[in-house]
Amino acid sequence: MQVNHGKAAPLRRIEPGDGVVYYSPSTVLGEKDGLRSFTAIGRVRPGEPYQGYMGDGFQPFRRDVAWAAGHETPIAPLLDHLELTTGKSNWGYQLRFGLIELSDHDFALIAEAMRVAINGRSAA
């Protein structure tokens, strides 16, 4: 996984076994096509952050994740049920910060919606 434009610090806050959910506001970076869905879910594998190479000198930090075969799931039906978004009209704002902590409740609800059996600590 790679977060916050490849910064190492956020990846150091998570631990092996933590759950990870990717939220995608669009299908293409910078486009406003209205995808607004959870698109990946898994667990952080043992190991520390490491640098990858993407070309032109860009070497972002990453962590290995055991990704589950989840189904892309729109956030809209979950907004009134997630602790992260319930009662918040501007719920999307907090998701712009990259890696944020989710409650176990929210992680389990998202996993269920994505049709994945998964338990434990979580981050999005």
Image (cartoon, helix red, strand yellow):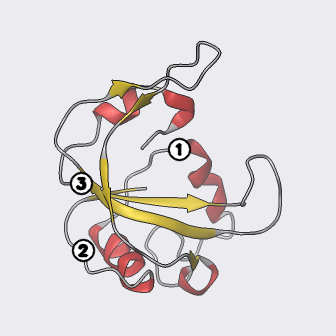
Q: Is residue 8 above or below residue 91?
A: above
Give neighbour class at mark 2: few <14, some 14-19, many 20+ (Cα, 10 Å): some
Looking at the rendered image, the quarter that the C terminus falls into is: bottom left
* SS class, disc 2: loop
Q: Nearer the observer, disc 2 or disc 1?
A: 2
Q: Residue at x 30, y 29 (%)?
A: 49
From the viewer's perspective, tell me whether residue 117 is left or right of residue 80.
left
* SS class, disc 3: loop
Question: Residue 48, position in %: x, y?
Answer: 23, 30
Q: Residue at x 35, y 70 (%)?
A: 107
What kind of residue is marked 3? Asp
What kind of residue is marked 2? Ile
Looking at the rendered image, the quarter that the N terminus falls into is: top left
Q: Residue at x 39, y 85 (%)?
A: 115
Sequence-earlier tag: 1 or 3: 3
Q: Is residue 65 above or below residue 109?
A: above
The residue pinned by badge 2 equals 118
Sequence-earlier tag: 2 or 3: 3
Sequence-earlier tag: 2 or 1: 1
What kind of residue is marked 1? Gly
* SS class, disc 1: loop
Give neighbour class at mark 3: few <14, some 14-19, many 20+ (Cα, 10 Å): some
Q: Which mark is residue 18?
A: 3
Q: Residue furthest right?
A: 32
Q: Which mark is residue 116?
A: none
Q: Which mark is residue 98?
A: 1
Distance CA(mark 1)–CA(mark 3): 16 Å
Question: Residue 92, position in %: x, y?
Answer: 65, 60
Distance CA(mark 2)–CA(mark 3): 11 Å
Give neighbour class at mark 1: few <14, some 14-19, many 20+ (Cα, 10 Å): some
From the viewer's perspective, tell me whether residue 66 is left or right of residue 109.
left
Q: Is residue 93 above or below residue 64?
A: below
